[in-house]
Image (spheres, rainbow, N blue to C red):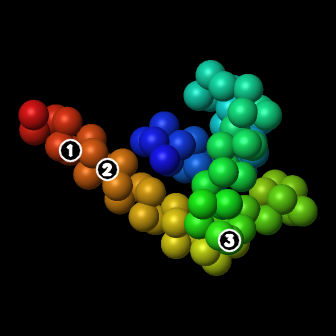
Amino acid sequence: MHLRDLELFCEVASLRSFSRAAKALGVSQPAASETIKAIEKQLGLELINREQRPLELTAAGEVYLEGCRELLDSYRRLSDRV
C-alpha cells in the first residue's frame, strides 16, 4: 500500500464519491474504485457501504479514516522537519 492510496481513501471518504475523489486527484473513477477494493481485500473487510448515496463509511471505515489521517499528518510533519 502507498501513501497515495491512503490519500485516495481519505478523499473518497471526505467527498463521499468515487467520481469526485478521482477527479480531484487526477485518476480515473475505475482506478479509484479498484484501489479502494484492493485496500478492503488486503484488510479483509468493507470500508465503504456502496449501496448508500452519497457513500457511507462502515464502522471499520471510520476507524480506518482516522488512522489514515493520522498517518498522512505524521508524514507531512516529518517531511516538513526534514
Picture quadrant of residue 11? top right
In 3D space, how far apart are the residues under numbered discs 3 and 1 (Cα atoms)? 30 Å
Q: Residues within 10 Å of mark 2 (few under 14, many from 20)?
A: few
Which kind of residue does numbered mark 2 sit on? Asp
**For the residue carrying disc 3, how many other residues have a C-alpha within 10 Å: few (<14), some (14-19), or many (20+)?**
few
Q: Identify the element where label 2 is drawn.
A: helix
Residue at x 31%, y 50% (from the top left corner): 73
First in sequence: mark 3 or mark 2?
A: 3
Estimate the x, y position of residue 3 in percent, counting from the top left.
43, 42
Residue 30, how many percent across, how many down?
Answer: 79, 34
Q: Which residue is mark 3?
A: 45
At horizontal 59% and vertical 66% (from top left) the residue drawn is: 43
Q: Is residue 42 above or below residue 38?
A: below
Whole-angstrom CA distance, mark 3 to mark 2, is 24 Å
Q: Residue 6 got which mark?
A: none
Q: Residues within 10 Å of mark 1 (few under 14, many from 20)?
A: few
Q: Is residue 20 visible?
A: no
Residue assigned mark 2: 73
Image marks 3 and 2: residues in contact by CB distance under 8 Å: no
- Report the amino acid beneath label 3: Leu
- Residue holding disc 1: 77
Amino acid type for the residue under numbered disc 1: Arg
Camera-near label (3 vs 2) is: 3
